[in-house]
Image (tube, rainbow, N blue to C red):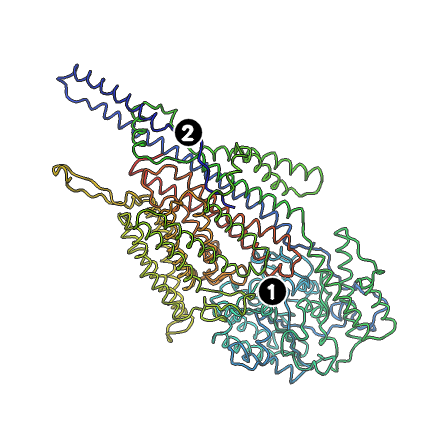
Amino acid sequence: MPPPQPTPKKAVPAPDYKTLKSQWDAAKRKKDAEDATKKAVTAVEPNNTDEIKLRELRRAALEGRRKKAYQSRWAWTAGFWVWMLAIHLVGLGYFTSGFLLTRLQLDDKSLCDVSPAGQEGGILPAWPGKGTPEGGCWHPKTFDKAVVVLIDALRYDFTVPVDDNAEFHNRFPFMYETAVREPNKAFLRPFIADPPTSTLQRLKGLTTGTLPTFIDVGSSFSGTAVEEDNLLGQLRGAGKRVVHLGDDTWESLFPGYFEGNLSRPYDSFNVWDLHTVDEGVIEHIFPLMEEGRKGEWDVVIGHLLGVDHAGHRYGPEHPEMGRKLRQMDGFVRDLAGKIDERTVLIVMGDHGMDSKGDHGGESDDEVQAALWMYSPKGGFGRTKPEFAVPPATAVERPVNQIDLVPTLALMMGIPIPFNNLGRPIEEVFAGPRGNSWNNLAAAERVAAAGVKRYQASYFAARGMTEEPASTPGSPADLWDKAEGLVSKGNWVAVYSAFAEYQRETLARCKSLWAQFNIKNMILGIAVMGFGVLTLLVYVSKGAEDDEAVDDPELDDAEKSLEIMGVIPDSELPLENVLERKLVAAAFLGAVPGLIGGALHAYLKGTGDYYRGAAMAALTSIATVGVSLYEIKETLRTLVPSTIWGWMAAVFTLSQSIGFASNSYTIWEDSILLFFITTFGFVTALSALRIQSLADRYMAIYHSVLFVVLGRLASASKLCREEQMPYCTSTYYASSTSSTSALWQLAIPFAVSLILPTIIKAYLQPTRSYEGLAPAWIGYVFRTGLFMSALYWVLDSADNGNWISGLPEKKLKNLSVYTAQMVLGLAFVAGTTAFMWAPPCVSIVTSASKSTPTRAQVAILGYGNAHGARYLLLPLNFLVSLILLSKPMGGGALAILFWQILSLVEILDSNSLSATPIGPVMLAILGSFHFFKTGHQAVLSTIQWDSAFIPLFSVRYPWSPLAVAMNTFAAQILATVCVPLLVLWKASPKKKGALAETSKKLGAFVSFFAVEGWMSMMWAGHLRRHLMLYRVFMPRFATAGVVLIVVDLVALGVSLLGLRGNTVAIGEVFGWAE
């Protein structure tokens, strides 16, 4: 909770006005006496210039000391924020390590000649080559070769007939028609993925037969090699040659597994490219199907990405999706014609896609993929006549994706991977007539035996005790019953019994792995909570101690006394020493905690040396708390004493406490809009007390404008699944599209025309539209906005193929170069201009009205010298963020910036600069516009295509940075604008800007810290809630990432920008502190 307005302090450490005045009068009398004496003695000598030179030297020395002191205070302030970032990282890291589910990875490998079902009492008679890959390790081998085609994001309804005209329906009929026409040769079934529905996690499940956990999610884009037993390892162990074509994720998961001279990996992350990977797979797979080359391989894996990329780039409801599905239909049709009787063809999707073409979550559309198997020799069967026709929807007769692992292993005659939890697929083992129950029962039994063996090994490794068979319904009880049926020869019953055992075991394993490390979770919550409290105490205490008095006459008198030597150098007041004490205390406190944690791990032999980081964090927080002396008095100041303090507290707490409700979390953007409206209404009422009529009208105007702009921004919506049907998406052309409508392309052009004029209107009342401001805002900034708008036109022209006959990728090249120029303009030219630009002021000389012979000098923009110059920094970020957002998102960011300008005017008009409501409202604006830029607290709304706005391919770290700037654009812009709360309408004589800005950052960051802390607690408390994975866990993850992003931007941009701005002002007007 951000702190309330601080209570009046007891004493100001700097000399007061009366003391300085008396010192000034005494010095003046002394100086007059000295001058009179010198004049009497040296009446005939010219004026002595030595004193003037001495004063100039003293002035330069004083300026140098003040600059050095400022830089020292800035360094200690930055050190404090580095420490706060470390506290947040430790707290989030510890909670995450206990909250994100993990499972123990066993290193055991299945052996061909050691069947988990034992060698005696088998259901099937001995077959030739039993126990060898040539005949079949655990079950008679069905096929010698396999061609596995993985069509990324192939949703089940893409493959079955649907009575509508959607672009994604009825474009891929071959697999359904074949399954209906030749049921013994092919079958088609829904293929259900276990969330998270990201490709890397699905590939792990499809090759190991295990379920993903959240730790796997955390490594989703790292490509960590699979080390546990898997299909490819078993194939390689059996001497099989595996060829891979397509998505290069396979290469990172299984390095060295593939035939290097035949395999062709392709970059998988470029969602803008719909054709390169697909065409590469098609080009290289058909030559391998020729009769003369079939001896070069045993298994071919082709992973095509065009359907997935079409979904990400356009959405499923786009003609490009229809064209891509028709291409896949023709490809599979041609490939099936090349398959011989010794080979099985498997076509499947790894996951589906939602209505916008994205995936990653657990909605029905995201988990419902398709599975099709084909063999020209036949052999597939149905146990019931009604199963001959593929299911009309994915909810009928679905197959778990992990079921592919035992099925393919037994078909190819290799052992089932040790950690597998899947079951054999019924159609493969039921026989052509669907009555080979002994074969089906044998396959089910050996797979179940493997699961039983794995479960026993897992329990032993974990030191757990398996539930005894005496417990009715336990896996052990079900196993004993199934084994008891084997001797009776009722194979239908045997099959059903082992199937029931596997279903129950799978459910138990899911429950077993849903175990949380409560100790780490509590430790993370404690670190985070004490860190939040320390931050609030720092803000409150610092505001009391670092309050500066802005009095020009007092400042001039003080500076003159320092130059004259009346106040010795050693007596110069050194402000903001608080951060130095806190950083030193934090370091000293961390050392014993770190050593103690490591020593505890060593003595106990637990090996958890990382726990020392948590102990170091807690002891560091404790020593910092002790350094904040008079804690009891300071803690009392945390209780709000004004309506603005209460409003800031209520907004912060209600926002965070509301995360305990899934409905509140789902409709979070509407709640934030209510806060914005409430603030505008209350400030409008407060403005009625302003004495000046003109000021009153302007204050009311800005309050009303603040509310209206919020309502206007709310027109941009991207609805999450849980909001349907009460929400209509407007961010894209439609709810099933990932591209912008034609009318939305006009928004960036309108922004380029209007926004610079609006900014000019805010600068003109203080006459601060001077210096570099007219050129930069009127021309450079406007040009950057216009080029951003031009980029989106080029992008839409490329997506929609507006201009036929152009060379391939011509428009893409133009758009990327345009984006690169915009970013160069914003960050290269913009940073250079901000670092070296003088204050945005102009000096005007005119004749004095009272004394025409004397010149009168006026400095235009003097009253807003700090604010006008600092404004250049967020403007540079705004250009880049608008470019990296979709047209609707760019419009929302422009409105956000307009609201920020209105906010600083509201705070100034109502004299609210010293209250916490300003930073809290700025944080609320950043959170609100996160939703208005096309995002939700779910993985599937990440706009991965933003990585390719300024780039042709994936480039690290620039591609992830572009995605991060797109995702958190609103929070980044709000963080960069925090110093404006202090610098707006601040003259060069502004004192204490660094300390005040640090406290504003503290109040601003505390909003997100409380949000992260509370979402952390609710996620832990509701860890068994039905909506944990869909609502609470994603919201915690979002809050945690946002907090770290805000910390980094505050440290690396806001504080650095403040330093550069203060140095530039001080070099021209002198140092005020």
Q: Secondary structure at mark 2?
A: loop
Q: Hey, which residue is sitting farthest right in the picture?
A: 488
- Tell me the residue that label 1 is attached to: 362
Residue 226 location, x and y as percent? Answer: 64, 58
Q: In the picture, residue 883 is in which quadrant?
A: bottom left
In-front residue for pair 54/546: 546
Residue at 72% in and 70% down:
424
Q: Secondary structure at mark 1?
A: loop
Camera sees residue 557: yes
- Check disc 2: other Cα within 10 Å, few if <14, some if 14-19, many if 20+: few
Residue 911 location, x and y as percent? Answer: 38, 45
Say which amino acid is labelled 2: Pro
- Check disc 1: other Cα within 10 Å, few if <14, some if 14-19, many if 20+: many
Residue 421 location, x and y as percent? Answer: 72, 64
Q: Is residue 93 above or below residue 293?
A: above
Residue at 72% in and 68% down:
423
Camera sees residue 223: no
- Tell me the residue that label 2 is attached to: 13
Residue 94 location, x and y as percent? Answer: 61, 47
Instruction: Judge from the rendering whether residue 643 lies leftward or rightward of residue 879; answer left or right.
Output: right
Q: Residue 436 — which label?
A: none
Say which amino acid is labelled 1: Glu
Q: Are marks 1 and 2 in contact (CB under 8 Å)?
A: no
Between circles 1 and 2, the one closer to the viewer is 2
Instruction: Judge from the rendering whether residue 948 lies leftward or rightward of residue 596; answer left or right.
Output: left
In-front residue for pair 1014/1070: 1014
In-front residue for pair 434/556: 556
Q: In the picture, residue 362 is in which quadrant?
A: bottom right
**First along the sequence among labels 1 and 2:** 2
